Amino acid sequence: MQKETLNIPNISCNHCVAAIEGELKLIPGVTAVNGNADKKQVDVEWDLPATIDVIKKVLADINYPAA
C-alpha cells in the first residue's frame, strides 16, 4: 500500500472535500481518501492498479489539481 498527502489549493469548503473524496474513491485500487478543507489537503492510500499519476490526473480533471 502507498500513501501520500496532497496539497489542493482549490479546496474552499467541505463540499469540495466531498467531491474530491467521491471521485478518488471511484479509482480502482484507491483504498482510503480523507480530505481536510482547513488544511487544503487530501490523504490518499492506494494499491495497484492505482498510481499517484492516475490520482493526480483525476484531481486535475475535476478542477482540483494537486500543487
Image (tube, rainbow, N blue to C red):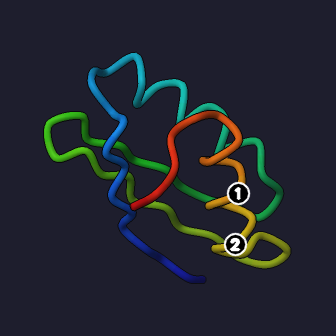
Task: Identify the residue shown where x is 39% and y is 47%.
Answer: 34
Task: Identify the residue shown where x is 28% and y is 21%.
Answer: 13
- Secondary structure type for disc 1: helix
The residue wearing badge 1 is 57
Q: Quadrant of the C terminus?
A: bottom left
Left or right: residue 3 compared with residue 31: left
Q: In the rendered structure, are the residues bearing label 1 and label 2 in contact, judged by CB atoms less than 8 Å apart?
A: yes
- Secondary structure type for disc 2: helix
Task: Identify the residue shown where x is 39% and y is 59%.
Answer: 43
Residue positioned most to the bottom: 1
Compared to residue 36, the image places residue 44 above or below, namely below
Kind of residue sitting beneath label 1: Lys
The residue wearing badge 2 is 53
Q: Report crowding for label 2: few under 14, some 14 to 19, many 20 or more residues within 10 A (C-alpha).
A: few
Decide which of 63, 24 is in the foreground and name it: 63
Name the spot of residue 58 as percent of width and height, x first. Answer: 70, 49
